[in-house]
Image (cartoon, rainbow, N blue to C red):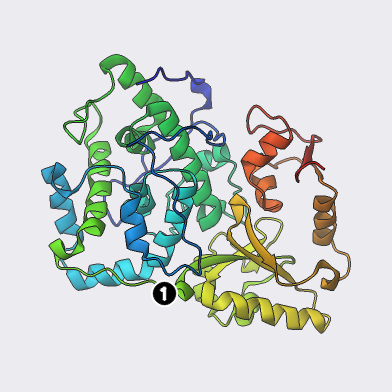
Amino acid sequence: MRRLRPLPLALSVLLAACATAPSPTSRPQAVTPVQAPKTAPVHDLARPAASVATPGDNANVWDALRGSFAMADCDADPGIMEWARRYTQNPERFENQIGEVAPRIAYVQQVAARHHVAGEFALLPWVESQFRPVPGGKNMPAGMWQIMPATANALGIQVNKNFDGRMDVPAATDAIMALLSRYHDDLDDWRMVDYAFNAGEFGMKRMIDQHGAPPAEPVIPKMPVKRVTREHLVKLLAIACVIREPARFNVSLPTLPSEQRLVAVNVNNSMPMAHAASHAGMSPEDLKELNAGFRNGVVDTSAAAYLLMPSSHAQQFRSSLLADNNDGDMQSVSGTAVLPPLGAVLNAATDDSQSAPSSPKNSRHATASGKTHTVKAGESLWSIAKRYAVDIRQLEQWNHLAGTSVKPGQVLKVSAPG
């Protein structure tokens, strides 16, 4: 166990984790602002190798998920089997539930793999919310990750009256996976990462300083944590257990055809959600559920310049907007990003010369081609990375930043030099 890096206690904020499934409840959790995970050698058993399936890849999502697991199996602790049986006590209902959220699980697994996070954590939203986009009240957690407002601020996730990034699947998932990756850098034990997610990183560090790192056995560490924290890990391992051995619980896991996988289509101009849904051939309700971060029925590209949708609807969306664009419509679309916050952007569907006349959004695009961005009040390095569809780690490298802090007026390079 390497010595842990000390972090200022004043940086701690709250992150919520649910005590029971499926109803989420808030729990305190201390985090510090996320820095991009290091590109470091992978521990033999600690970090899974990245294995990312693209939307066109017919690889079985469940095989990919099992292959990325890094923690204990079903028989490691009686509590794991107890909760696994609870989850599957009504096999038909479980199959329906897991089938509904399978596209989200596949998407989250891709992000986890890119951050070298153990595959079990792709199932963490099942413990938190059963992958539902839970809206948050004042000072309450929100989204499928159940993120507290203060935590969102620390992670650079935008939350305002028009947009709640905690409800945005790509933004929130990437931020959480970066956080979990950093936790593992500090704690070097995926079990402690889960404890830290539920109870707070600083508390875990103090506990390890006092009692030492937990041994491999028992699988559920006998540390002086609250029951809800210990149970949180048990629940996570339990749902992973069901994915490992579904037949053991008399359930079948659904197939996920490539056309049902989620992709994010980059959108150049703001538009009503209903307008976007019509172009995509989806109901406004279904598109809104996948893009719940937009609060006012408008796709606001200043907050998130993409829409998450099934792969089968992405081409129709692009083609429909292209047709409108050619007819002089102010709406336009640039392409598809599998994981836009990580900068994985596919070929553009339209040429920039076909876009609408000059507008504030088009001006921002021109700025991107000029390779610089001037930081405005309220912006974070994360929001800037998302805006220009680049990796936050690239921004840190291009601008020689030691962390993620930026100041208004600061000029940043937003594309590779040269």
- Residue at 66% from the left image edge and 41% from the top image edge: 394
Quarter that holds the N terminus: top left
Which is more toward the observer, 42 or 202?
Answer: 42
Instruction: Provide the secondary structure element on which disc 1 rests.
Output: loop
Quadrant placement of the C terminus: top right
Q: Is residue 132 visible?
A: no
Expressed as whole percent of the image width and height from the top left, the position of residue 72 reads 22, 43
What's the residue type where badge 1 is placed?
A: Pro
Query: Would you name the residue on which mark 1 appears?
Result: 257
Q: Dot 1: within a 10 Å radius of its alpha carbon, few (fewer than 14), some, or many (20 or more) residues?
A: some
Nearer-the-camera pick, 9 or 60: 60
Q: Which image quarter: residue 253?
A: bottom left
Let me know if residue 29 appears in the view. yes
Name the side, left or right, on which 239 lies relative to 376. Answer: left
- Tell me residue 148's x, y (percent): 47, 43
Q: Answer left or right for 121 relative to 397.
A: left
Q: Describe residue 33's horizontal placement relative to residue 226 as left or right.
A: right
